[in-house]
Amino acid sequence: MLQKESQAVYDAAVMKKEATKVSLVNIAGNTALSVFKLLAGILAHSGAMISDAVHSASDVLSSFIVIIGVKLAAREPDRDHPYGHERFECVAAIVLAVVLAGTGVLIGYRAVAAIVKGEEGAAVPGVLALVAAAVSIASKEIMYWYTRAYAKRLGSAALMASAWDHRSDALSSVGALIGIAGARMGFAITEPLASLVICVFILKAAYDCFRDAAQKMVDRACDAETEQAIESCVLAQSRVLGIDRLQTREFGSRIYVDLEIRLDGNLTLYESHAIAEQVHDRIEREFPSVKHIMIHVNPGDEAK
């Protein structure tokens, strides 16, 4: 039986460095954007923009959660955690999903309250609030695609949750833009109506982030396409007669593989071990997200 670890320490170090860099960029961007939107809301007498500034400020906290989660996930295995700490990243993603859901519920609550109470007598927001909303939409979309690109490259659930947090902020700013424009035209109710629609989008994003992180916490198998690709990779190796068992499970952002291959029973132990090594190394090269591979060799009949 061959049991080896992939270059997981190197991968974890790279993920920690890249995710921290992205999070620091997000912190700087959200801090500047929050201050700008807060000043614009105060100067332009826009309650919607002030609320939007608070939403952006909450993203700073989200970025710190990502940094902490990824830092913990990158720690090397120890006596109490022999398989590593990758699931801490899933915990961070779940926390972000909860924060995202809370934001959506708060926006929805305020929207319903505004519709019930009415907005008569509210001050007409100035043009600066419209400019701030437009800048916020553009900035948060850029931050969404930037964070999403790194999340997909690193396979990071926490970064993906952070990306959706940016998208929710962009949607919130769209609601603010519609509300401010409507208020300037005499239709104050447009803001809470738009906020209700935004609330649904934010809750959907929170649910998707939570579901993805939760599934990775409970040893879900890889998708069928990935398992088929691994199977094809194994069978392409010379002298492998077949696969008796292939099991995979996701461990945070990494994959564990348990494999039983069938080789000619007349091979020596050294020859069987060498072939198992070749299979292991090939899987490791073609599937960088695989952290751990355990290969068991069963005797077979090459004539068959």
Image (cartoon, rainbow, N blue to C red):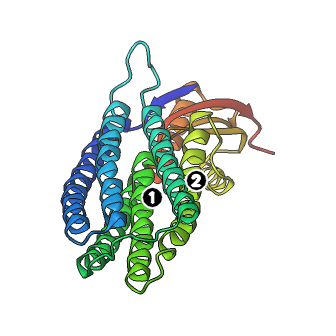
Compared with residue 61, is residue 122 higher up or lower down, i.e. above or below?
Answer: below
Q: Is residue 101 or residue 164 the one in the foreground? A: 101
Q: Is residue 129 above or below residue 74?
A: below
* Label located before the other in sequence (1 or 2): 1
Tell me whether the residue at label 1 lies in contact with that at label 2, contact meaning CB atoms closer than 8 angstroms.
Answer: yes
Q: Which mark is residue 208?
A: 2
Quadrant for the N terminus in the image: top right
Which residue is at a point 70% across and 45% down the rendered structure image?
241
Q: What residue lies at 26% left-to-right and 66% top-to-bottom?
A: 41
* 111 sits to left or right of 14: right
Q: Nearer the viewer, residue 156 or 183?
A: 183
The structure residue drawn at horizontal position 21% and vertical position 55%, both measured from the top left corner, is 31
Q: Amino acid at mark 2?
A: Asp
Crowd around label 2: few <14 · some 14–19 · many ≥20 (10 Å): some
Residue 292 on image: x %, y %: 49, 34
Q: CA distance from mark 1 to mark 2?
A: 10 Å
What residue lies at 28% left-to-right and 39% top-to-bottom? 13
Extreme right residue here? 304
Label 1: which residue?
Answer: 164
Q: Which mark is residue 201?
A: none
Q: Of helix, strand and loop, which one carries label 1?
A: helix
Q: Is residue 85 left or right of residue 255?
A: left
Residue 265 seen in render: no
Q: Determine the secondary structure under disc 2.
A: helix
State the image coordinates of residue 44 (x, y, percent, origin top left): 24, 72
- The answer to whether 16 appears left or right of 194 in the picture is left
Question: As rendered, which of 297 and 30 lies closer to the eye?
Answer: 30
The x, y position of residue 221, in whole percent, is 65, 42
